[in-house]
């Protein structure tokens, strides 16, 4: 992985300072920073470029940077006690990486690993400057909301994996991707390879492909190359009966 300081960045849009400032402004727990403090936050920030399958950081290593994804995609993984890597989720443009390290009372460490899915640009901001931003009440409140959201998602993941039936896990996962009140048909974009999605759902890629084919034949979903389209919620749910 290589990097460059912001003031030496090429003219490519992903490294233009204006675009990066807008990107940071869209991070909920940084969006309330006064303009002068946003400028301070970006001092010393760098654009890192990671190639596909390259690690941005590893679990339990010292956390020196908080990352905002500029382009590309990153997979978050957590090592289990038996040495396996469990996929948590995928982060794309505008998403943050490593922010959970900010809650540590001692030496900050990353609580998971991050691997680039493809060639990926990330904005790296120093941990200490991010910690200082939390001195602002509005930023701190938004950050706590982010932690609550993360905890809720992980509890839902745990509940999902307690379902013994692979079909039930896949159905629950698909229904969770539907926004509240979403009208059908609704497309779910797949930002990770199906083999990684299978790992996230604790099943083999072959099982995932077989279940998707069955759901497609039943008229519940439409399987496309980079997305799944949910056509009929009731048919999707009925497959578990």
Image (tube, helix red, strand yellow):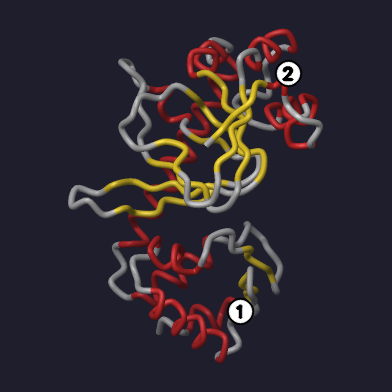
Tell which circle, 1 or 2, labels the residue nearer the N-terminal end: 2
Q: Establish if 206 lies above or below 23.
A: below
How many numbered markers are drawn? Answer: 2
Residue 117: percent from left, percent from top: 53, 53
Report, in whole angstroms, how far the alpha carbon at label 1 lies from the one at label 2: 44 Å
For the point 37% across and 61% down, the residue is 160
Q: In this view, does 152 lie to the left or right of 5?
A: left
In this view, the mark in front (1 or 2): 2
| Nearer-the-camera pick, 70 or 2 | 2
Contact between marks 1 and 2 (CB within 8 A): the answer is no
Point out which mark residue 148 bears.
none
For the point 63% across and 48% down, the residue is 72
For the point 40% across and 26% down, the residue is 101
Residue for badge 2: 7
Residue 222: percent from left, percent from top: 63, 80
Q: Establish if 110 lies above or below 190.
A: above
Residue 173: percent from left, percent from top: 47, 65
Residue for badge 1: 223
Residue 61: percent from left, percent from top: 33, 29
Which residue lies most toward the bottom here? 217
For the point 57% across and 52% down, the residue is 118
| Nearer-the-camera pick, 41 or 46 | 46
Q: Residues within 10 Å of mark 1 (few under 14, many from 20)?
A: some
Q: In which quarter of the image is the C terminus?
A: bottom left
At numbered mark 2, what does the secondary structure look like: helix, strand or loop? helix
| Nearer-the-camera pick, 135 or 78 | 78
Q: In which quarter of the image is residue 31?
A: top right
At numbered mark 1, what does the secondary structure look like: helix, strand or loop? strand
């Amino acid at each position: 992985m290589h990097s460059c300081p912001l003031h030496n960045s090429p003219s490519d849009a992903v490294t233009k300072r204006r675009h990066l400032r807008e990107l940071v402004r869209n991070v909920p727990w940084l969006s309330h920073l006064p303009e002068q403090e946003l400028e301070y936050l970006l001092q010393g920030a760098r654009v890192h470029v990671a190639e596909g399958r390259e690690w941005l950081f590893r679990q339990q290593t010292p956390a020196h940077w908080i990352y905002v994804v500029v382009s590309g995609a990153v997979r978050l993984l957590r090592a289990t006690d038996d040495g396996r890597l469990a996929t948590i989720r995928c982060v794309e443009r505008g998403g943050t990486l490593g922010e959970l390290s900010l809650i540590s009372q001692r030496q900050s460490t990353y609580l998971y690993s991050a691997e680039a899915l493809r060639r990926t640009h990330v904005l790296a901001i120093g941990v200490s400057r991010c910690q200082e931003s939390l001195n602002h009440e509005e930023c701190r409140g938004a950050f706590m909301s982010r932690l609550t959201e993360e905890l809720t998602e992980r509890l839902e993941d745990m509940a999902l994996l307690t379902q013994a039936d692979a079909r039930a896990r896949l159905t629950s996962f698909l229904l969770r991707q539907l926004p509240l009140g979403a009208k059908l048909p609704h497309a779910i974009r797949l930002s990770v390879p199906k083999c990684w999605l299978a790992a996230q759902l604790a099943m083999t890629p072959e099982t995932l492909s077989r279940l998707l084919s069955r759901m497609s034949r039943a008229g519940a979903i439409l399987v496309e190359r980079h997305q799944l389209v949910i056509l009929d919620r009731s048919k999707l749910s009925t497959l578990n009966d």
